[in-house]
Image: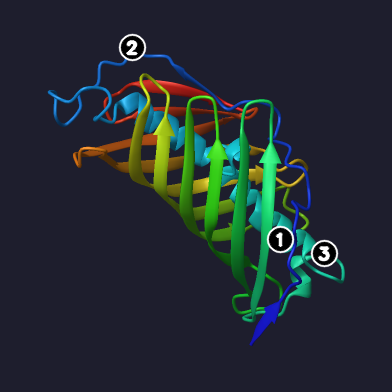
Amino acid sequence: MKHLILPQTTMKKNSPFMLGLAVLTLTFASCSKDDDSNDGPETSITEEEAAEAIAMAVSPESGGMVEQTNQAIYTLEEDNSTANKAEDYECGVEYGSSYNISGQSPNVDYSASLIWNWIVDCGTGTLPVTVDFDLTGTSSYNGPRISSEATIGADITIENLSDSESSYVVNETFSMTGSHESFVSNENAFTSTIEFATTDLTILKANYNVVSGTVYASFEGKASNGNTYDYSGTLVFTGNQTATLTMGSGNTYDLAW
């Protein structure tokens, strides 16, 4: 049986991450090589462009993975007409919700149309142990260095539901497939699929900040001339709304929101 929640038209809670532009700073001189060294900048996808696209796909300011993870938590806590607790959902019953959200900071604006389904798992008992979310939807953002229109999808598992726990622990896969306009070096258009796999994101219940956790990121892009480019990296959350992205080349990018 599937329970439907009334659609929402605006973000239910202002995200604590929505504080300013997602900053990506190169902290190791980048000399990455593209798959085809004869390509000009207009027809290649550089590592810096891939890193920028990955950063924005994570950023809460562009409606990325962090924001959608928090939306799952908000849905669990607030889309409930009784006491706003996971315990008020029936174990093993599928619930659903769909709504549009948007956000704007001084330099980035985004919008998304989301469809959520979730099931609370009580294990062998009667109290919730985990909740599994499935997300599909579309999103778009405009930033000073890159813009995007994409489809998104995620499978999100949230643990530590008990009130006695101060933080949620989240593991998920998240994907974004679509088109980009980049202004990192020269104006460049490309398509890409970005995929994330997380390991134990720890999110404080008090303010929804991600205080720790690791994300493996892969980027598969196709340039306007048809050439393909693959990049990968590991992103580590370091608290205080910061993270470090280390690409396969060893180049390191600092992110802050």
Q: Position of residue 89 (x, y in %)?
A: 73, 75
Farthest residue to the top: give it: 29
- Give the CA distance from mark 2 to mark 3: 48 Å
The disc, 3 or 1, on the residue closer to the chain's N-terminal end is: 1
Say which quadrant the N terminus sits in.
Answer: bottom right
- Discs 3/1, front: 1
Q: Neighbour class for label 2 at 10 Å: few (<14), some, many (≥20)?
A: few
Residue with the mark numbered 2: 29
Q: Secondary structure at mark 3?
A: loop
Q: Secondary structure at mark 2?
A: loop
Three-letter amino acid code of the residue under disc 2: Ala
From what the image shows, is residue 250 above or below residue 90? above
Three-letter amino acid code of the residue under disc 3: Asn
The disc, 2 or 3, on the residue closer to the chain's N-terminal end is: 2
Q: Position of residue 212 (x, y in %)?
A: 56, 37
Q: Residue at x 34, y 44 (%)?
A: 191
Q: Residue at x 73, y 41 (%)?
A: 15
Is 175 in front, or is 112? Answer: 112
The disc, 1 or 2, on the residue closer to the chain's N-terminal end is: 2
Q: Is residue 73 visible?
A: yes
Residue with the mark numbered 3: 84
| Left or right placement of residue 218 versus residue 31 in this view | right
From what the image shows, is residue 195 above or below residue 3? above
Say which quadrant the C terminus sits in.
Answer: top right
- Give the CA distance from mark 3 to mark 1: 9 Å
Quadrant in which residue 49 is drawn? top left
Question: Contact (CB < 8 A) between labels 2 and 3?
Answer: no
Residue with the mark numbered 1: 75
